[in-house]
Structures are given as C-alpha cells and as structure tokens.
Image (tube, helix red, strand yellow):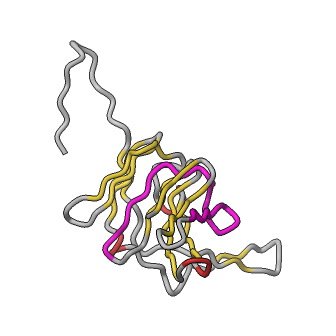
C-alpha cells in the first residue's frame, strides 16, 4: 500500500508492518505528495507541489527501490503545482491531474521517450546539449472561469 505525505512517498509492507518513505533523494521532484494514481503497467503517477512523476517500484521489503521520471511545464504540463486529491483515472485508462493553472489529461500508455533528442549548440561555446524530449506531450487544459451571474453553473466532462 502506498501513501503520500508532506514527507514523501511511503510504502507500507504488511509482512514487516513497517512504512518505508522515499523522498527527493530517491528522485522525486518534491517531498510533498498530493495525489497518487496507478496505471495499467503498474507505474505510480505521483503529483507534487513541484511537478508530476512516473514512479517505478522494484524489489520487496528492504530491497524496495524506486526510479522516477519527472515532468514539468517543459513537457507540456499546466504548471508544476498540483492540487491535493485532484486526480482521477478514467475508464479509458487516461489520467486527469488538476493543478493551479488547469488540468492535465493524458494516457500513460502513449507517453514515450524520444530515442533521438533534438540537437542544440551555441556559437559562443564549443559544446552541445541534447535535451530529452517526449514524443507525446500532456494536454494542458486551462482553468475554466464561470461567467458573472446567479452563481449556478453546470460543467459536463
């Protein structure tokens, strides 16, 4: 069983009855975990106050380790800050995470890392940087602002 707290991502091992907590040192973008969803492949999608992370857990007991792939605005997210418990896994497998600047809707199965990242170089230095790019970016949906009126509104998704 997984739990998110302000101190990190915790796993409860029922065999030993011990919680094990993973923090930024393990690769998370922040220690404050606000929502957790699991996809069809067993990855945890963890929203924090500093971005979204795809977490893979391997091993058991004291051998349990996590690896993280962190996402932020450069990957197409609405922003780094996510809201507490503002996450939903749809029947389609898509995931919806709500943040301060809107929602992110994506299908985890469609997120792929590019095998050939774009090349960047500067004429001022004799170096090149090859950033990692995603083939599929997240759909960021801006916040809906209700029209002025009687205060009663309906939104259908």
Q: Residue at x 56, y 77 (%)?
A: 61
Whether residue 116 sits left or right of residue 23 in the image: it is left
**Rendered location of residue 57, percent (x, y):** 51, 76
Quadrant location of the C terminus in the rendered image: top left
Indicate the quadrant where residue 99 lies: top left
Q: Position of residue 59 (x, y in %)?
A: 53, 83
Is 18 situated above or below 100? below
Residue drawn at the location 60% of the way across and 65% of the way down? 20
Kindly identify the residue that appears in the image at 45 percent across and 43 percent down: 84
**Measured along the vertical axis of the image, is residue 42 above or below residue 90?**
below
Region in magenta: 18-40
Residue 126 relative to residue 53: left or right: right
Image quadrant occupied by the N terminus: bottom left
Residue 64 sits in quarter? bottom right
Q: Nearer the viewer, residue 4 or 107?
A: 4
Residue at image position (50%, 69%) is 13
**Membership of 153 in magenta stretch:** no
């Amino acid at each position: 069983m997984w739990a998110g707290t302000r101190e990190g991502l915790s796993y409860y091992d029922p065999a030993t009855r011990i919680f094990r907590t993973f923090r930024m040192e393990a690769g998370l973008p922040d220690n404050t975990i606000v929502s957790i969803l699991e996809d069809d492949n067993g990855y945890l999608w963890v929203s924090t106050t500093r971005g979204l992370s795809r977490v893979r857990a391997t091993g058991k007991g004291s051998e349990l380790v996590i690896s993280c792939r962190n996402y932020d605005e450069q990957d197409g997210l609405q922003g780094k800050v996510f809201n507490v418990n503002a996450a939903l896994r749809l029947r389609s497998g898509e995931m919806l995470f709500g943040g301060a600047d809107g929602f992110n809707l994506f299908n985890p199965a469609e997120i792929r890392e590019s095998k050939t990242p774009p090349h960047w170089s500067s004429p001022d230095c004799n170096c090149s940087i090859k950033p990692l790019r995603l083939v599929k970016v997240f759909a960021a949906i801006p916040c809906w602002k209700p029209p002025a009126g009687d205060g009663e509104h309906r939104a259908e998704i």
